[in-house]
Image (cartoon, coloured by chain):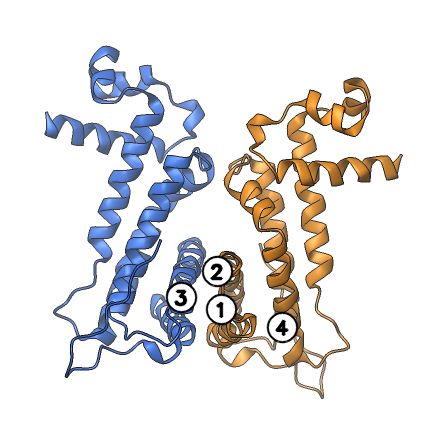
Chain colours: A orange, B blue
Amino acid sequence: MQERREQLLDLGLRLFGSKPYDEISIEEIAQLAGMSKGLLYHYFPSKRDFYVACLRAASQQLRRLIRPDPALPPSEQVRSSLSVYLDHVRANRAKIQAFVGGGIGSDPEVLEVTEATRRAVWEFMLAGMRAADDEHLLRSAVRSWVRFVEAIALDWADSEGVPKDAVIDVCVAVLDAAVGESRQPPEPPGPPRPISMGE
Amino acid sequence: MQERREQLLDLGLRLFGSKPYDEISIEEIAQLAGMSKGLLYHYFPSKRDFYVACLRAASQQLRRLIRPDPALPPSEQVRSSLSVYLDHVRANRAKIQAFVGGGIGSDPEVLEVTEATRRAVWEFMLAGMRAADDEHLLRSAVRSWVRFVEAIALDWADSEGVPKDAVIDVCVAVLDAAVGESRQPPEPPGPPRPISMGE
């Protein structure tokens, strides 16, 4: 049952990543899945629900992928996550484009999933930082850095000949500039002052 | 005739900025404008066309506002444009939110206007820069910086107590980091090597 659901999500990710939302029908999904429309509706009450579930699955996949590796020294964690992220964007360029540009981008639930994905990224990043004087501005700078990374990754995925390391260097330099002195591991003696995530 | 059209666009900007796209009808627009539906259709064949025209007018307004002032020294041009931009975002927060989040964001023509606006911003920025070794990466970094600025400006507009100058400082530091050594005025002796805008 759970397995069947996951197979459907896999199928949906491929399908929604291959052509515009409006060109996909419940009939087509059921046919490709080899099940009746009735059974498909049992898993997902509507095409929109199915789409949102697929997007959510893609988001979870990405979040697992880019979770910083605690075995690495802090300075390497960001580079390593960025490297994995860039590979992911290049490998899934068409799907990402379809989801971002051709889907139902202003649907509130879709925006919610997109925002949750971004939030996961900046929370990973903030977790390794010392609290700054102006925490609001720090959070905001890291959040905005995520938008920078998204944009430069899509550009890079479309380009040829720009070395991945050069993009990572730019992203790290921008993060350093964005957060000023805050991007150091928390001071060793005392416990780090937690940064509330706000929202 | 031209004047009537501009009055309609002013009305549309206020209206689309005040409530969701789907809640606005052609009847309401005609009534507020004090004209018949027939005459309104003469100016704009559909609600969607009217919406896109309003968005285009907002984009042109913004581009006029943030055009760098050539009378300023190059280092001040970016700060000055950022300052005007931040004020604009704060003053128009609700409208921007309605256009970005509540409109028809995945409509191709809407995406085109949004992209053209961003392109204008990064072209302003690139115009003052020396050609870098890797022009593709430079253009991409400036483009992505525009996304950073958009995000941090919206955050700032929602916040209280973060000084505008601190946000401008972060944006300038991030731009410097993003473009490396390129953000200097072109060398005085020869003409600057033009940077092709691509796209």
Sequence-earlier tag: 1 or 4: 4
Disc 3: which chain?
A: B
* Amino acid carrying mark 4 in the image: Val
Q: Residues within 10 Å of mark 3 (few under 14, many from 20)?
A: some
Residue B49 picture location, percent across and down: 31, 26
Q: Nearer the viewer, residue B62 or A5?
A: A5
Residue hosting label 1: A162
* Amino acid carrying mark 3 in the image: His
Disc 2: which chain?
A: A
Q: From this view, report whether residue A40 is shown above or below residue A91.
A: above
Are discs 3 and 2 less than 8 Å apart at CB? yes
- C-alpha distance separating marks 3 and 2: 8 Å
- C-alpha distance separating marks 1 and 2: 7 Å
Please identify, in this view, whether the residue under mark 4 or under mark 3 is nearer the observer: 3
Q: Quadrant of residue A132?
A: bottom right
- C-alpha distance separating marks 4 and 3: 23 Å
- Residue drawn where x is 43% and y is 23% of the image: B23
Please identify, in this view, whether the residue under mark 4 or under mark 2 is nearer the observer: 2
Residue hosting label 4: A78
* Amino acid carrying mark 1 in the image: Val
Residue hosting label 2: A159
Are discs 1 and 2 less than 8 Å apart at CB? yes
Residue hosting label 3: B136
